[in-house]
Image (spheres, helix red, strand yellow):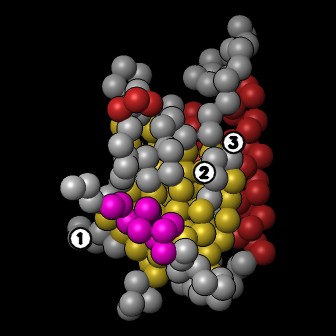
Amino acid sequence: MSVQSGFQTCLRGGILLEVAADDMNVLTSSSPGRHAIGTQALNGCTCVVILGESAILLAHIQPYDGAFEQDTQRDIPKESHDHHEHALAAIAQAVQQHSDSFPASSTAWGIFACCKEDGFVQSIFRQVQSHLQAMGYNMRSVFYDEKPVMEIVPPKGELIAYFNSSGEAELWLEGGRLWPSIQD
């Protein structure tokens, strides 16, 4: 008997605001019929989550393939860097549009893939961190293991956030709670 993941439970219950790859959305306390926001199929992708007082922003950013320029020291192709820049600019615009919901006290997360052979992509980490700092947020970070696609079984690759019954934002990655953290 398999255990249903939190993502699948919310999806089947019709309360999930699902964020597709290369998309972003904001869950507010007034989002009609939606009580959670989440994404799936994380495997090499980056997510940005901002947990505000009355809203949660989630962005799912895929890496882009492309050729490496011979004269750079980049650890990703320019196309991927530019794609992340575009997504991060859209995040900043959404935070500005919902500024009352995302005060400086909001908790910001960068969620990154980590591969056994190569580790994580440091330039994407720095890029996300830099953009979040420019918005006034300190970034918390977490890394998930990148796996061969055929080995992915939910809740692997799933991310979900919601406001609990006490009104606190909770963030879960692959079935494990990230926020609020027991250590904090």
Question: Sequence-wise, which precedes: disc 2 or disc 1?
Answer: 2
The question of residue 12 being in magenta is answered with: yes
The image quadrant where one finds the N terminus is bottom left
Q: Residues within 10 Å of mark 1 (few under 14, many from 20)?
A: few
Q: Residues within 10 Å of mark 2 (few under 14, many from 20)?
A: many
Measured as percent of width and height from the top left, residue 21 is found at 63, 47
Question: Disc 3 marks which amino acid?
Answer: His
61 or 4: nearer the viewer: 4
Residue at the outermost front position: 1
| Image label count | 3
Range covered by the magenta-colored residues? 4-13
Tell me if I can see residue 174 in this picture.
yes
Tell me if I can see residue 132 in this picture.
no
Looking at the picture, does residue 52 appear above or below residue 37? below
Q: Main secondary structure of the magenta part?
A: helix
Measured as percent of width and height from the top left, residue 31 is found at 65, 83
SS type, badge 3: helix
Residue under label 3, please give it.
Answer: 84
SS type, badge 2: strand
Based on the displayed image, in which of its 4 quarters is residue 55 positioned? bottom right
Q: Residue at x 67, y 30 (%)?
A: 64
Looking at the picture, does residue 140 appear above or below residue 82? below
Is the Cβ of the residue at disc 3 closer than 8 Å to that at disc 1? no
Based on the displayed image, in which of its 4 quarters is residue 145 positioned? top left
Residue under label 2, please give it.
Answer: 60
Looking at the picture, does residue 57 appear above or below residue 133? below
Q: Residue at x 65, y 71 (%)?
A: 26
Question: Sequence-wise, which precedes: disc 2 or disc 3?
Answer: 2
How far is disc 2 from disc 1 in space, using C-alphas?
A: 26 Å
